[in-house]
Amino acid sequence: LLLKALLPFDQIILLAPRHPERFNEVEQLLKKMNVIFARSKDQQNIDQVQVLLINEMGVLPKYYSSADCTIVGGSFIPKIGGHNLLEPILYGSIPLFGPWTEKQEHQKSFLKEHGVGFCLKIDEIKKGVFAILNDQDRLQNQKEKMVEVRALMQRPLQATLECLVF
């Protein structure tokens, strides 16, 4: 769904299936769609690919921190209800998400309250990504707001730690 909405794209798309059992399935889908891709474990000829398929666990922070924005895929499919909308912010990547966030409404409200991230429909996703990447003022504004949001997100942890210290 997202690949059809994004491709062709003039920058590399980092694609991370949520569950490792889907790595092979997504690889077959990319082949079927004739998408030029590489696997993150291999990373051969990475300059020539449209998609980097992240097919290993525990590496998302590295990829989040290298991406200006992150599309939270589960939020574009009904009944999945969204994935963690805040996780990309921890690494400085602007979250882009769809309308299906029923399991993450509190996170969506938090983002809206602080003006971070963008809720888009699937047919707006490519235009939305380009709008963010091509508007340096907007990009910088989002980066500054994410710094503030990360500080807010640390408060509960700090309060808990203070309670635990005698």
Image: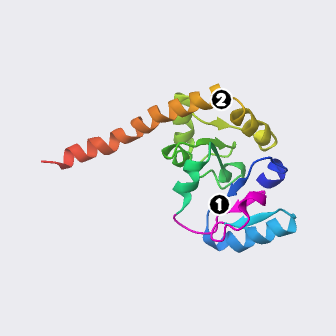
Image location (x, y in percent) of residue 164? 19, 49
Q: Which residue is mark 1?
A: 16
Q: Are the residues flagged by discs 1 and 2 in contact, CB closer than 8 Å?
A: no
Q: Residue at the location (59% across, 69% down)?
A: 56
The three-letter amino acid code for the residue at tag 1 is: Ala
Residue 122, compared with residue 135, is above or below; it is below
Magenta residue check for 117: no
Quick one: which residue is furthest to the left in this view?
166
Q: Secondary structure at mark 1?
A: loop
Residue 13, compared with residue 159, is above or below; it is below
How many circles with numbers are drawn on the protein? 2
Q: Would residue 114 appear left or right of 5 to someone viewing this image? A: left
Q: What range of the chain is rendered magenta? A: 40-58
Q: Which residue is mark 2?
A: 136
Considering the whole magenta stretch, tell me its main secondary structure: loop
Residue 85, compared with residue 43, is above or below; it is above
Image location (x, y in percent) of residue 147? 46, 34
Q: Which circle marks residue 56 in the picture?
A: none
Give neighbour class at mark 1: few <14, some 14-19, many 20+ (Cα, 10 Å): many
